[in-house]
Structure formats: C-alpha cells, structure tokens
Amino acid sequence: MKKLKSMLIIWIAIYPAITTIMLLFGDMLNELPTLLRTLILTLILVPSMVYILIPFWTKVFNKPATKRRNL
C-alpha cells in the first residue's frame, strides 16, 4: 500500500507540473531538438519535484484524518 501511495503522490505532483510547463513554454520547446527539449524539461521538473512538490503532497497526504474531522 505504501508504494501505491507514493506512486499517487508522484503522479499528482508531476502531471500538473508537466502540463503547466508545456502550456507556458510548449511552443518554444517544440522548436528545439528532442534531446535539448528533454534536458530543459528535466532541469526544471526534477528539482521542483524533489524539493517542492513531492514534500508538499506528502505532507498533505500524511496529515492525520482526525485533524480533518475536527475542522
């Protein structure tokens, strides 16, 4: 169950991040060669996933259910 939870957290973090980058910079990136485009995407996405998005979503999913019920 822990791997399933990790997979869902990663997917919830990566899908909107990729979509946002492609909406904002897709036209510019499409003009670049595939290897350069992939390099730029990973230079942006990997650090943001490791240091911002995954820690954020992990905290959201690890909050005890009792705190949510008491609100």
Image: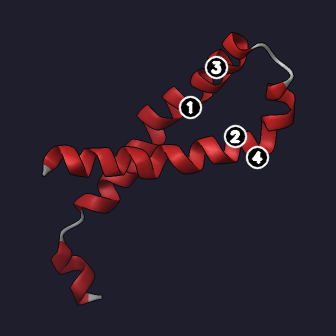
Out of 14 and 61, give the one closest to the viewer: 14
The disc labelled 1 sits on which kind of residue?
Answer: Leu
**Residue drawn 30% across and 45% down?**
7
Mark 4 vs 2: CB contact within 8 A:
yes
Position of the C terminus, as image quadrant, is bottom left
Q: Name the secondary structure under disc 4.
A: helix
Q: Which residue is mark 1?
A: 45
The disc labelled 2 sits on which kind of residue?
Answer: Ile
First in sequence: mark 2 vs mark 3: 2
First in sequence: mark 1 vs mark 4: 4
Mark 3 vs 1: CB contact within 8 A:
no
25 to the left or right of 58 = right
Q: Name the secondary structure under disc 2.
A: helix
Residue closest to the far bottom: 70
Q: Position of residue 30 (x, y in %)?
A: 81, 27
Mark 1 vs 2: CB contact within 8 A:
yes
Alpha carbon distance from label 1 to label 2: 9 Å
Q: Which residue is mark 2?
A: 21
Alpha carbon distance from label 1 to label 4: 14 Å
Q: Position of residue 16 (x, y in %)?
A: 57, 51
Alpha carbon distance from label 3 to label 1: 10 Å
First in sequence: mark 1 vs mark 2: 2
**Residue drawn 63% across and 15% down?**
39
Out of 46 and 4, give the one closest to the viewer: 4
The disc labelled 4 sits on which kind of residue?
Answer: Leu
First in sequence: mark 3 vs mark 1: 3
13 to the left or right of 7 = right
Q: Disc 3 or disc 1, which is closer to the eye?
A: 3
Q: Which residue is mark 3?
A: 38
**Residue drawn 28% across and 60% down?**
61
Q: Position of residue 35 (x, y in %)?
A: 67, 11
